[in-house]
Image (tube, rainbow, N blue to C red):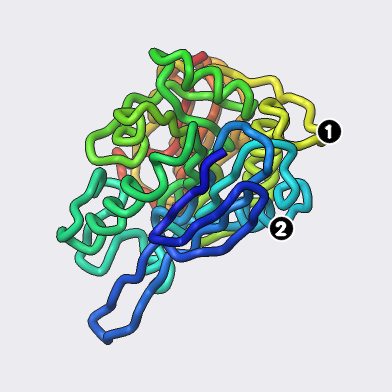
Amino acid sequence: MKDFVINFQTISPGECKQIALNSYELHTKTKIEIPVFVFRSKKTGPTLLLSAGMHGEETNGIEIIRKIITRDEIKKLNCGSVIAIPVINSVSFLFGSRDLPDGRDLNRCFPGKKNGSFGSRIAYDIMKEIIPLIDFGVDFHTGGAKINNTPQIRCVFEFADNVSLAEKFSPPIIIDSPYRDGTFRKESAKKGKPILVYEGGESMRFDYTAINEGVNGCLRLLKKYKMIDIDAPNNHSVKIKNDTWIRANASGLFHMNASNGAYIEKGDLLGVICNPFGSIEHQIRSTVDGYIVGINNQPVVNQGDALIHLGIE
């Protein structure tokens, strides 16, 4: 087995180290580092990347990785290596924001440039220092502001290695999700390194169901590759090929009647929108058979707002 070298720091087989991906300077001259945790067995095996905090307000993924890297099984791997980056976007995490100080989305900055924007530099360092070392990875996200996603893995069904990884992770929902330009997932795929995207919960709010599903999925993935010994039974995963949003048919106060992750049939009552000045109610009914994969928790809605994300098996 070869040594890993990240930012001129060496991690040999059998070692566990915390290192810095790089140092970035804010306008206050404050230095910001991105901590990277590396766990290596002396025995040959795959290298898994676990990353979170691409957006600074996505706290569930950060907590998932925190829980993983504190486990004894990870510190004493049977084989292979784990590289964990709990907070990729330390700058946005510092400010509790989705975007970088210049307004850019870090997950649209890949593959990055050495002398580019703040986000471009972070993306460049990840692609240069981390991606060459790994075999595959999981990048953890949550829904955006007020969007609560049921625990799910997003991958590209067209590629067998994506689907195989997703099945090993064994989440409740697996969604076919094409690549988007400028994303970590797409640029890693160009290097032959499949990255799954895990979505669960909403931003700036712990969702312990989503956190536990994320932790258990990681443990299942590690067990499948014989990197750890643990009892981690598989979930039944539903594969979602198509999706649609149910939108508000009126403006007012939105009350959700169905549960996130539930299976619903066409015509089922999903919720109501009430006029805040009276008793008028507008019913929201499903237009298809499918699974609820995301809910807008915004109580005040306008006509046309996306309310309920439905996945079609």
Q: Kindly identify the amino acid type of the residue bearing the numbered disc 2.
A: Thr
Where is residue 179, by image quadrant? top left
Q: Position of residue 60 (x, y in %)?
A: 57, 53
- Write down the residue under mark 2: 70
Q: Position of residue 289 (x, y in %)?
A: 52, 15
Q: Are marks 1 and 2 in contact (CB under 8 Å)?
A: no
Which residue is more in the foreground, 178 or 84?
Answer: 84
Image quadrant for the N terminus?
Answer: top right
The residue sitting at 49% across, 57% down in the picture is: 10
The residue sitting at 41% across, 17% down in the picture is: 242
- Residue 221 seen from this side: yes
Q: Kindly identify the amino acid type of the residue bearing the numbered disc 1.
A: Asp
The residue sitting at 72% across, 43% down in the picture is: 77
- Write down the residue under mark 1: 231
Which residue is more in the foreground, 163 or 174?
Answer: 163
- Say what secondary structure mark 1 lies in: loop
C-alpha gap between disc 1 and disc 2: 18 Å
Is 74 on the left or on the right of 99, as rendered?
right
